Image: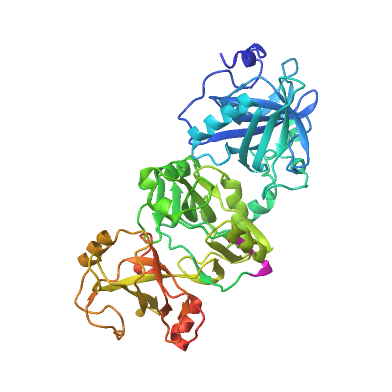
């Protein structure tokens, strides 16, 4: 019996701690961890990692650190039941471990580069057996990669180490001394302490929430869109996020369940059930905005994996970067940073639904880091900006590693050689509500099956040209209804307002044709003959 030692040290009915019963309810889609701050005879912290159906537990006398140069002793103690992850309270005098216990931190965790929960458990169990346990924490306070390394001095003695990564810091994380559940300190808990207060700026968050007007939950939200910037910049009034390479998605969480849909209002819940299930676990009344991505084995988002996810490839993550509505309050008028502070307290940082982090001020270095990792780019956002649903606002600016444009496929030309389905794709985009010609692409179909694409275009064939002004093209064009959207990469805009050397990257099934609007700089090029994208 895994929990025999736990049971032997406790007398039923004398302590509020959970009994050594098996876990209740369905298994979560991810592994959990918790750090208890325990004011026993000696104050210490208990790191507990879900593994094999129990919580593997380590007493850390000096507490965890985010400083890679610091090594902390961690003494392995008896396994605890899974339900102990939620325990917070006072263990009465005369009992084992008597004293106050708060949930100092909690969240999800995994093995580095693991695809899923099963893959994580296999690697973590092997690491535990080997005495070299590497894991990635995603909690409210502890984030990033850590390791537990067994010492040679004692079978139960380990060292808790923080690995060097983007979350490493010399700042003392133990200064954040409040429970992530009740907001109380162990001192407040010992005297039945006053009202619960959120950790780290919770008072400011509550104050911001009270400023937001009471309104019914919005339905069918049109997400806010970003303009374009040519290059990254630094600015104290802006924050910078990763530009995720996936499907933009809005989530409505309410009493009737979860709605998850794309920009063109197509339901995504059936296509990505793991994300929908994780959203349901939040048990919140909220409207969220974010991007669904599929990560490769190195953790990088891959649009190809997202399109092929039905084959079970890639790990799905819904990165949420904004919250529009929460508990009956319309948050769209609040400044971005206040919305994100509230959002961070609501969401986990791991699993299928995650909080999308940002960095303040330093856009140039952040862009360099994104480029080095092979990411699509970054999004700059004005820190004090409201959420303008359905608008393309200069308060949000996307900065890409490569120059791309969303285009409507308006037709195709005859193939010039045998064995080809078409010669080139005729491309357009919307400017001031009108579809304008911006060039044609003959450099492949970006991974889309050319035969299937040809069949889809034939089904959309029409006799008349869909452009507001008919372009001077050679004969032999088959015009189609402007419904399919593709993304193309190009070198620059010509003086005539056309794309130079456009090459199709992929179809954008998640976007409606009207969303293929000319970017800010592109629109200027088509109107003024500018030669810059």
Say which of 287 and 370 sits in front. Answer: 370
Count up the numbered dots: 0
Tell me: residue 408, above or below residue 176: below
Say which of 65 and 210 sits in front. Answer: 65
Residue 345 is left or right of residue 449, and the answer is: right
What segment carries the magenta color? 233-241
Q: Quadrant of residue 143?
A: top right
Which residue is depicted at the point 68% across and 48% down?
A: 167
Tell me: residue 28, above or below residue 302: above
Magenta stretch encompasses residue 239:
yes
Tell me: residue 507, above or below residue 125: below
Q: Quadrant of residue 180?
A: top right
Q: Position of residue 135 (x, y in %)?
A: 62, 36
Q: Position of residue 247 (x, y in %)?
A: 43, 56
Q: Can I make out residue 339 in this image?
A: yes
Which residue is depicted at the point 38% across and 76% down?
A: 430
Q: Position of residue 343 (x, y in %)?
A: 58, 51
Say which of 66 and 279 sits in front. Answer: 66
Q: Can I make out residue 103 in this image?
A: no
Q: Quadrant of residue 382?
A: bottom right
Residue 465 is left or right of residue 295, and the answer is: left
Q: Quadrant of the N terminus?
A: top right
Magenta stretch encompasses residue 113:
no
Which residue is depicted at the point 20% across and 65% down?
A: 459
Q: Position of residue 215 (x, y in %)?
A: 49, 57
Residue 199 is left or right of residue 315, and the answer is: right
Dominant secondary structure (helix, strand or loop) of the stretch shown in magenta: strand
Of all residues, the one furthest to the front in this rendering is 418
């Amino acid at each position: 019996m895994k929990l025999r030692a736990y049971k032997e040290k406790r007398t039923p009915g004398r302590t509020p701690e959970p009994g050594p019963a098996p876990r209740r309810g369905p298994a979560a889609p991810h592994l959990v961890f918790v750090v208890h701050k325990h004011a026993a005879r000696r104050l210490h912290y208990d790191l507990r990692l879900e593994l094999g159906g129990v919580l593997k537990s380590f007493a850390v006398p000096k507490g965890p650190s985010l400083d890679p140069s610091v090594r902390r002793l961690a003494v392995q103690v008896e396994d605890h039941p899974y339900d102990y992850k939620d325990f917070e309270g006072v263990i009465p005098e005369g009992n084992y471990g008597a004293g106050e216990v708060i949930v100092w931190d909690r969240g999800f965790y995994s093995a580095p580069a693991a695809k899923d929960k099963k893959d994580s458990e296999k690697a973590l169990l092997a690491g535990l057996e080997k005495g070299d346990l590497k894991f990635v924490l995603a909690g409210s306070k502890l984030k990033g990669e850590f390791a537990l390394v067994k010492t040679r001095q004692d079978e139960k003695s380990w060292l808790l180490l923080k690995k060097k990564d983007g979350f490493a810091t010399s700042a003392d994380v133990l200064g954040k001394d409040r429970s992530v559940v009740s907001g109380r300190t162990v001192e407040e808990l010992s005297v039945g302490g006053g009202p619960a207060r959120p950790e780290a700026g919770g008072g400011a968050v509550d104050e911001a929430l009270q400023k937001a007007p009471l309104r019914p939950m919005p339905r069918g939200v049109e997400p806010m869109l970003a303009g374009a910037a040519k290059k990254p910049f630094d600015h104290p009034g802006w924050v910078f996020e990763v530009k995720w390479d996936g499907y933009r998605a809005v989530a409505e969480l309410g009493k009737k369940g979860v709605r998850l849909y794309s920009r063109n209002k197509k339901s995504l819940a059936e296509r990505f059930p793991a994300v929908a299930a994780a959203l349901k676990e939040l048990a919140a009344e909220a409207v969220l905005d974010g991007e669904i991505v599929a990560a490769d084995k190195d953790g990088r988002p891959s649009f190809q994996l997202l399109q092929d996810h039905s084959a079970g490839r890639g790990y799905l993550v819904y990165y949420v970067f904004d919250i529009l509505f929460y508990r009956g309050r319309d948050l769209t008028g609040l400044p971005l940073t206040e919305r994100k502070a509230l959002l961070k307290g609501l969401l986990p940082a791991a699993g299928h639904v995650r909080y999308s982090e940002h960095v303040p001020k330093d856009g140039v270095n952040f862009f360099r880091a994104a480029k080095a990792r092979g990411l699509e780019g970054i999004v700059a956002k004005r820190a004090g900006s409201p959420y303008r649903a359905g608008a393309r606002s200069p308060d949000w600016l996307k900065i890409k590693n490569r120059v791309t444009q969303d285009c409507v496929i308006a037709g195709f030309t005859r193939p010039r050689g045998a064995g080809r389905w078409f010669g080139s794709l005729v491309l357009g985009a919307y400017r001031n509500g009108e579809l304008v010609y911006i060039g044609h692409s003959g450099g492949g179909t970006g991974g889309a099956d050319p035969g299937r694409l040809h069949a889809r275009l034939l089904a959309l064939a029409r006799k008349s040209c869909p452009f507001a002004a008919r372009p001077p093209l050679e004969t032999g064009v088959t015009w189609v209804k402007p419904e399919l959207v593709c993304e193309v990469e190009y070198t620059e805009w010509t003086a005539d307002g056309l794309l130079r050397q456009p090459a199709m990257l992929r179809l954008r099934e998640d976007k409606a044709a009207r969303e293929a609007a000319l970017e800010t700089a592109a629109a200027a090029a088509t109107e003024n003959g500018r030669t810059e994208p």
